[in-house]
Structures are given as C-alpha cells and as structure tokens.
Amino acid sequence: MPFGHAGSPANRDGLVQTFTFKPFDMPANAAALREQVRAFIRDNMTDGDIARRANCWQVNDPDFSRALGKAGLIGLSLPRQYGGHDRSALERYIVLEELLSVGAPVGAHWIADRQTAPLLLRYGTEEQRRRWIPGIAAGEVYGCIGLSEPNAGSDLASVRSSARRDGDGWVLNGQKIWTTNAHIAHIMIGLFRSEEGSERNARLSQFLIPLDTPGITIRPIINLTGEHDFNEVFFDDVKLPADALIGEEGQGWAQATAELSLERSGPERYLSSMVLVTELVRHAAKSGDPAAIALAGRFTSEAWTLRQMSLAVAGRMAMGEDPALEATIVKDLGNSFEQAVPQLVQQVIELDLSSDDPLALLAAQLLQVSPSFSLRGGTREILRGIVARGLGLR
Ligand SMILES: Cc1cc2nc3c(=O)[nH]c(=O)nc-3n(C[C@H](O)[C@H](O)[C@H](O)COP(=O)(O)OP(=O)(O)OC[C@H]3O[C@@H](n4cnc5c(N)ncnc54)[C@H](O)[C@@H]3O)c2cc1C
C-alpha cells in the first residue's frame, strides 16, 4: 500500500516523497511458534498482580527472563555461535507479540535483547560479542541505554559527557539521566564526547561499560506510580580499557542513530495498553453495554491496522532494508493509540478506579504511566519532525 503519490505535497525541489506499508505473510511455522509461546506463558506466568501486566516491557522479573532464555525465546534472531537461535526477524516478532499481548514481565532482558546484542553484532569486536551476547540470549545479562543527559534529551547532539584517552584506555566523566534499568543492568552502551571541544554530533563515540566499574554511581528516579524504572548515572573518572570502545572512534552518532531505529521499530510501540483492550472485550461481552461494545470494536480495528503497519516495517527490516520513516510513523500512531486506550475507557465506562475490578486496575495503572509513552524513545514532536523531513516537507 504505497502512500503519497498523486496529490502529495512536493518539497522545495519539487520532489514528492513516498512511504510504503507492504503486507507481509507470516512464516509457515507461525501457528506452531505461537502455540509454543502460549504454552510457555501458561506454565510460567505466575504474577497475580494484574496491574503489572500493563506496560509489561517495563516490568522486571529476572526468573521469568531466565526461564524465557532457557526455552530459547530470547535472542531469537541472533546467530547460534553467540548463543542465539538463528531464527528470522518475523519469528522474533511473533514471540514478542504473544508476550506483549498478555502482559508478560519481559522488562529485565528487553533492552539487551532488542538493542544491546544487535548493536554489538553490528559494531562490536569479536571479543565483545563472545563476552556478552550469550548471557543476553540466556536472559541473564541485562543492558541499558546511556544516551540522554540533563541538557541533551531531544537534542541528543548536545551530549557533554566525555571520554578522554588515558594511555591505552579511556577515562569517562559526566552524567546520564532517565536510564531505564541502570539499577539492574550489567552493562550500558553509552554515548560520550571523545574529543575535547568537538561540537554537536561530531567526534562522539560509543562505549560498552560494565556498571560495576569503580567511579559509577547510580541514583534512582521514582516515577509517578512510585516505581523505580529509571535512574541518574554519574561517571567520576571511570577508567575503561581500550577495548571498551564500540565500533569506530568518532562514529558514535551514526552508530547511536542505528540504535534508535532498533529502539523505535518494534511491536512494543503500540502494544503497551493491549491488556486493557483485552479486558475491555471481556467486559463488553459480559455486560452487553453498547458503549463498551462500540469501544472494543474501535480499538480492535485500530490495533489491527497498526499491527499490519508494524508487520510491514518488521518485514522490510527482515529483508535488510531500513524503513526508518515508516517505523517513525508507526511509533507515533502507536503511542497515540496506547495513550488513548485508558483515556477512552475511563470516559466511556463507569469505573471505580479504587476498586479491584481488573478493568479499573489496568485503567488506573495505564492512566498514570501512559504519558511517558510519547516521551520514551523520542517525543511526539521530534518524531513528527522526522516524518515531515522524511516526506520532504521541511
Ligand atoms: C519512561 C522513559 C524511559 C526512558 N529511558 C531512557 C533510557 O533508558 N536511556 C536514555 O538515554 N533515555 C531514556 N529516556 C529519555 C527520553 O529519551 C527523553 O526523555 C526524550 O528524548 C526527551 O528528552 P527530554 O526529557 O530531555 O525532554 P526535552 O528534550 O527537554 O523536551 C521537552 C519538550 O520539548 C519538546 N521539544 C524539544 N525539542 C523540540 C523541537 N526541536 N521541536 C519541537 N518540540 C521540541 C519535546 O517534544 C518535549 O515535549 C526515557 C524517558 C522516559 C519517559
């Protein structure tokens, strides 16, 4: 389904940009794989606290992650030689979709599996891959993302934390902020300014930082629901060996941008509120309330459309393409959907938000955490700027 041909706005040079969402068929073994994941969930999902099923890719359960790794359901598309399973990106998508749609607690290993391991595979040394990827695929090594700083969020090129050469090695100084899971992670991939006085996105480098290195202080930031998801991380003369550098010195910007594509393109960008949709469908069937039935229908059709678009992105990535524009569109529309779900449920259905009705518990949790959905991984305004640029409008 190509968009943007006839009638599309042209940019200043008269060029018309397009974006494409081409349907992809699921692999032949999709049904069997889904059944395998569902059986795993039946056997291993024990947490009775239904609110923890909302926004589940930020809910940590190390036992669950380890069991998932043992079952061969993490590191699915990573090479076997590093402990992965050599499966396709679409097979990985199926596994994620099954886990996210029931609210499985996949937060502990999420970043490492989604981002850290693929980044090391692409830019890391053989030694770095062998040292870290097998533990990631086992669901035992967790990673975190060291991009944002107090004065460098949307404007990531303003990063000031520094990496200075020291003999063969490096010395890091500075501060990262909003670092999800730094308090449980084993490693951070961090972006640092590796040439003093360099400006904007020039001369930045990425480092692989074991978080037990002396000189690192991790302080919690408690979120609106009283939970500890993210942190401030301080670097005070942190000494790293030469082989902590990832990829090429000075190429950190290009590498971090590739990392953002991985961060923005997955099904988690529209499924964070899906457990509430499922609960709404149950409620509609039980109560027969026409307003609940209509809302369930609306959510189902929107979720189906987003899924087709998200799958189209996954399919193109599986073919080695980089559909960054389409991924950005899906993230923005997906975030709007997952934020609208709890708001509309609250408007349409009479809920006692202090009761222990599952619908009320999930809605209450999501009403509090969903404002963050359009901040994490790039804010709405930034994403729309990227889309506008991608379409040749600015
Ligand atoms: C739940 C959560 C988890 C996170 N986890 C991590 C993590 O693990 N690692 C990490 O590095 N970061 C993480 N972040 C940080 C996240 O990437 C930043 O919050 C985000 O990039 C925005 O940066 P900022 O908070 O500094 O806001 P700012 O950049 O200060 O933006 C403030 C507001 O101004 C708007 N704005 C800024 N610039 C422009 C512009 N040019 N045009 C129009 N509007 C603009 C923004 O859209 C936003 O609404 C996380 C954030 C959240 C909420």
Image (cartoon, helix red, strand yellow):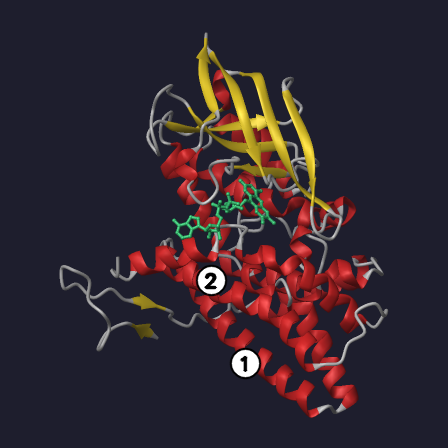
318 or 16: which is nearer to us? 16
Q: Indicate left or right for 201 with 355 as reference.
A: left
- What amino acid is labelled 2 in the image? Asp
Q: Whole-percent x and y of residue 28?
A: 53, 69
Q: Is residue 121 above or below residue 249?
A: below
Q: Whole-percent x and y of residue 170?
A: 49, 16
SS at badge 1: helix
**Structural distance between the alpha carbons of marks 1 and 2:** 17 Å
SS at badge 2: helix
* Foreground tag (1 vs 2): 2
Residue at 79% in and 69% down: 353
Quarter of the image where the C terminus is located: bottom left
Q: Whole-percent x and y of residue 316?
A: 39, 60
Q: Is residue 158 visible?
A: yes
Q: Residues within 10 Å of mark 2 (few under 14, many from 20)?
A: many
Q: Which residue is mark 2?
A: 332
Q: Which mark is residue 6?
A: none
Residue at 32% in and 60% down: 388
Mark 1 CB within 8 Å of ligand 1: no
Q: Which mark is residue 301?
A: 1
Residue at 63% in and 23% down: 216
The disc, 1 or 2, on the residue closer to the chain's N-terminal end is: 1
In this rendering, the count of numbered labels is 2
Q: Residues within 10 Å of mark 1 (few under 14, many from 20)?
A: few
**Residue 285 lies in quadrant:** bottom right
Q: Whole-percent x and y of residue 62?
A: 75, 44
